[in-house]
Image (spheres, helix red, strand yellow):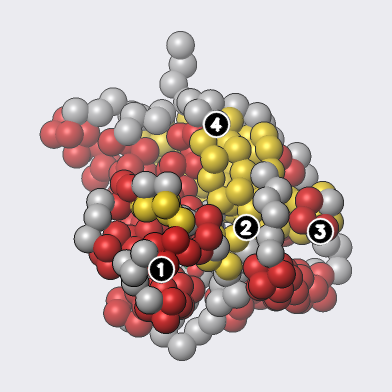
Amino acid sequence: MARNKIALIGSGQIGGTLAHLAGLKELGDIVLFDIAEGMPQGKALDLAESSPVDGFDSGLSGTNTYEGIAGSDVVIVTAGVPRKPGMSRDDLLEINLKVMEQVGAGIKKYAPDAFVICITNPLDAMVWALQKFSGLPANKVVGMAGVLDSARFRYFLAEEFKVSVEDVTAFVLGGHGDTMVPLTRYSTVAGVPLTDLVKMGWLTAERLEEIVQRTRDGGAEIVGLLKTGSAFYAPAASAIQMAESYLKDKKRVLPCAAYLDGQYGQKDMYVGVPTVIGENGIERIIEIDLNSDEKAMFDKSVASVNGLVDACKKIQPAL
Ligand code: TXD
């Protein structure tokens, strides 16, 4: 049986980490693509040279042409420019929209059957544009943000409670930005909702709000420390979890930026919602009941994503 083929469009910080993780997990053969000459080839060779040590068999190659991604089963897109300190995700919009146009055309021509995971920021608008530019079915084009945002929330909670990260589940809805909606009553420690943990005296409501806010600012916290780019280890790990669920038909329930066609009262937009990822891509969008506070936060987040999508339409009227 032939191995799966995984194409990484953009071989920078996240792209390189994705290649490493995909290799270590033997998810398939890996092609790194970038416009920078030699860089994807160099990373591919370096990673290939680590494979005898770590004991994994994955073909690793680098390319600067879209032919190289032909027939890919999964395409993960990080191409574009990351944030510098002081920049918002939205500042990236104009530059990265042009990049999505090129990437979408490449995927349309060479990998029309792939499951496409977009990571490039501003995420919800870029994945929306990438789906349009590529013309792939909406269930096969998805954005990665919720897994990362939930992972940050889980980590902060596990630290706070001094329990294993494995026993903390978290639920984050909405756009990947300052308006994301961490849902405390659906986030748990071993099944006990955070709202109950407040009643049990594990933490105060104020402390919980601080952790929620740190989660919202999680990306900026890393940008502020790194100074030369944005987070890459946790974003890569998150996208690999999504790719793995597709390739192995695991049907994981994961929060992703998915195409809404009436769900949550929204049409023709991408925003973070709970989904099921299996062999058919996004197989289901789970619609949960939101109370009035949560609904208000979700609507605010949707409005902010819609603002970015409108900005895309202004720059590129064909969309
Ligand atoms: O949760 C999330 N979705 C995110 C998103 C979390 C963290 C970072 N997030 C975003 O991912 C970030 O704001 C960026 O938009 C992307 C990629 O971040 P990364 O840290 O990997 O950026 P790098 O290291 O700059 O890599 C980007 C690469 C770089 O090598 C460029 O040469 C290449 O993209 N690039 C291109 N490749 C192909 N085609 C085109 N047109 C192109 N332009 C730049």
Most extreme residue toward the front is 200
Q: Name the residue under label 1.
A: 198
Q: Residue at x 46, y 11 (%)?
A: 1
The picture places residue 289, in percent across and down from the top left corner, at 70, 54
Q: Distance between the residues labelled 4 and 3?
A: 24 Å
Label 4, residues with CA under 10 Å away: few <14, some 14-19, many ≥20: many
The disc at residue 266 is 3
Which secondary structure, mark 4? loop
Earlier along the polypeptide chain: callout 2 or callout 3?
Answer: 3
- Disc 4 residue type (three-letter): Lys
Foreground label between 1 and 2: 1
Q: In which quarter of the image is the C terminus?
A: bottom right
Q: Mark 2 points at which residue?
A: 272
Q: Residue at x 56, y 77 (%)?
A: 178
Cβ at disc 4 under 8 Å from ligand 1: no
Which secondary structure, mark 1? helix
Earlier along the polypeptide chain: callout 4 or callout 3?
Answer: 4
Q: Which of 129 and 184 is in front in this view?
A: 184
Label 1, residues with CA under 10 Å away: few <14, some 14-19, many ≥20: some
Q: Mark 4 points at which residue?
A: 251
Q: How far apart are marks 2 and 4 (CA)?
A: 17 Å
Foreground label between 1 and 3: 1
The picture places residue 185, in percent across and down from the top left corner, at 53, 60
- Disc 1 residue type (three-letter): Val
Q: Distance between the residues labelled 1 and 3?
A: 33 Å
The picture places residue 65, in percent across and down from the top left corner, at 54, 46
Q: Nearer the viewer, residue 91 or 210?
A: 210
- Disc 3 residue type (three-letter): Gln
